[in-house]
């Protein structure tokens, strides 16, 4: 994952469901990952979102 952008959508390879961030999160990594996305970890905004 790039350190200056977020991934808003993710398609599950197994079931093909498309995951989207939960309300208040900037990306799928912040909603479903075990750690926040790199921009949030580095306390800066994502270039691809308004988080």
Image (spheres, helix red, strand yellow):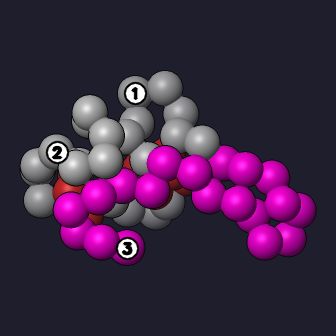
Quarter where residue 2 is shown: bottom left
Instruction: Name the quarter where the C terminus is drawn.
Output: top left
Decide if residue 10 is on the left or right side of residue 12.
Answer: left
| Location of mark 2 (residue) | 45
Total marks shown come to: 3
Q: Point out the stretch of residues depicted in magenta.
A: 1-19
| Location of mark 1 (residue) | 24
Dot placed on the residue nearer the N-terminal end, 1 or 3: 3
**Inter-mark Cα distance, 1 to 3:** 20 Å
- At a point 66% along the width and 48% down the height, the residue shown is 19
The question of residue 7 being in magenta is answered with yes
- Near mark 1 (Cα within 10 A), the count class, few <14, some 14-19 or many ≥20, is few
Q: In this orientation, does residue 36 appear?
A: no
Check whether the beta carbons of the residues at disc 1 and disc 3 lie within 8 A of each other: no
- At a point 22% along the width and 50% down the height, the residue shown is 47
Q: In this orientation, does residue 16 appear?
A: yes
Decide if residue 14 is on the left or right side of residue 40.
Answer: right
Q: Nearer the viewer, mark 1 or mark 3?
A: 3
Considering every residue shown, the one lying at the far top of the view is 23
Dot placed on the residue nearer the N-terminal end, 2 or 3: 3
Question: Element at badge 3?
Answer: loop
Check whether the beta carbons of the residues at disc 1 and disc 2 lie within 8 A of each other: no
Question: Could you tell me residue 36's position as x and y percent?
Answer: 34, 56
Decide if residue 11 is on the left or right side of residue 6.
Answer: right
- Residue toward you, 42 or 4: 4
Question: Could you tell me residue 14's position as x and y percent?
Answer: 85, 71
| Location of mark 3 (residue) | 1
Question: Element at badge 2?
Answer: loop
């Amino acid at each position: 994952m790039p350190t200056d952008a977020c991934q808003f959508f993710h398609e599950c390879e197994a079931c093909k469901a498309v995951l989207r961030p939960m309300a208040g999160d900037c990306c799928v990594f912040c909603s479903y990952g075990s750690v926040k996305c790199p921009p949030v970890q580095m306390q800066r905004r994502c270039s691809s979102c308004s988080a």
